[in-house]
Image (spheres, rainbow, N blue to C red):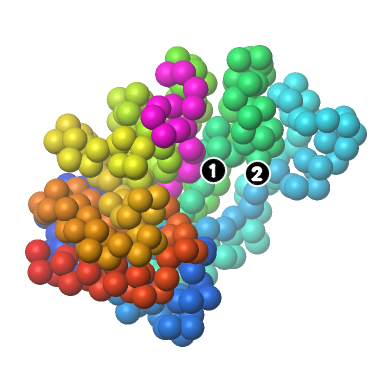
Amino acid sequence: MRPRERVIKTIRHEQADRMPVYGWVEANLKGPITEAFGSVEAFEDHYEFDFAHLFGGPPTFRGEDLEGLRADLGRDLDPPAALDLDATDPNDRNAYDDIVGKVRHHKEERDRFVYVQTPGIFEALNGVFGIENHLLYLLMYPGELKEIYRRQAEWNRAFAMNCLDLGVDMIHVSDDWGAQTGLLFSTDTWWELIFPAHQVTASAVKQRGAFLSLHSDGNVNDVVDGIIELGYDVVHPWQESAGMDLHAQKTKHGGRFVVMGGLDVQTTIGFGRLDFLESEIERVLRIFADGGLLFCTTHYVQDHCTIEELTFAYDTVYRLVRER
């Protein structure tokens, strides 16, 4: 079975020949990986990764515009001020050159399933307001934020449609909502402000017949019903170190969406405990022995992880998914 077919079957809750495998390894470990393997691409080929996370495209707002408005105001941006910001053109095709090249490398040349990171709502606008201010503004300026979120959602939809036109298989919406034990804000706020903004892109992607995935760190148990209602096919990372139990997900929601994750960077990889690392990989693979998991790191592997531990982890994964 080819890599892309393997991933698609898993997302569709069909039986694949083995579990698909990937990992967010480049951001912090590009140097050690390159020294050991020649390049990150060679590492990905060596471990026969089945899917790939793509970055690229235009930013929603130009950095110089944000800094210029802050300078004019002499303070941080608040929602009333941010209403004067002009977004970039999401249809600037020159801004997608990186994505085009990565689709060619991963999908066309290696037949991998490719997904592209696209902005969420809350996380995307933390760059405008700062997260602490943003949380405060949810209470102070709900009306203004609703309009700002609407504009961001429309921009996100255009961005996603352009990525699908370029051959991307799945739109991956990155929007951190969770802290270690629960949401960063109330469930009422999520349903009133976040849910309708996500629905704009989610509905458009599903109408195109494409796959849709969500990234949110932390504990999002309180809004899983909304995630399902939005139509997310994949949820990353389902963070066990934040109280998101993988066995419970498999039992309760396994038929509704698949998890991308399983290798926790907060507790498992990068701490020099190889026996524990191996046992955790084995435990996760047992839970999803009949499908439902795209094996991946829960986030970027951190720079305290040695190349020896990284290769130990992926040697273990490579062996076990084929044995099973």
User: Is 8 situated above or below 314?
Assistant: above
Q: Disc number at residue 119?
A: 1
**Residue type at the position of mark 1:** Pro
Q: Is residue 244 left or right of residue 19?
A: right
- Residue 190: x, y in percent? 46, 22
Over which residues does the magenta segment extend? 171-187
For label 2, the residue is 60
Q: Specify whether residue 115 is in view.
A: yes
Q: Nearer the viewer, residue 104 or 122?
A: 122
- Residue 103: x, y in percent? 45, 66
Q: Is residue 294 left or right of residue 132?
A: left
- Residue 285: x, y in percent? 17, 56
Q: Is residue 257 left or right of residue 93?
A: left
User: Is 321 situated above or below 188?
Assistant: below
Q: Quadrant of residue 48?
A: bottom left
Instruction: State if disc 1 and disc 2 touch (CB < 8 Å).
Output: yes
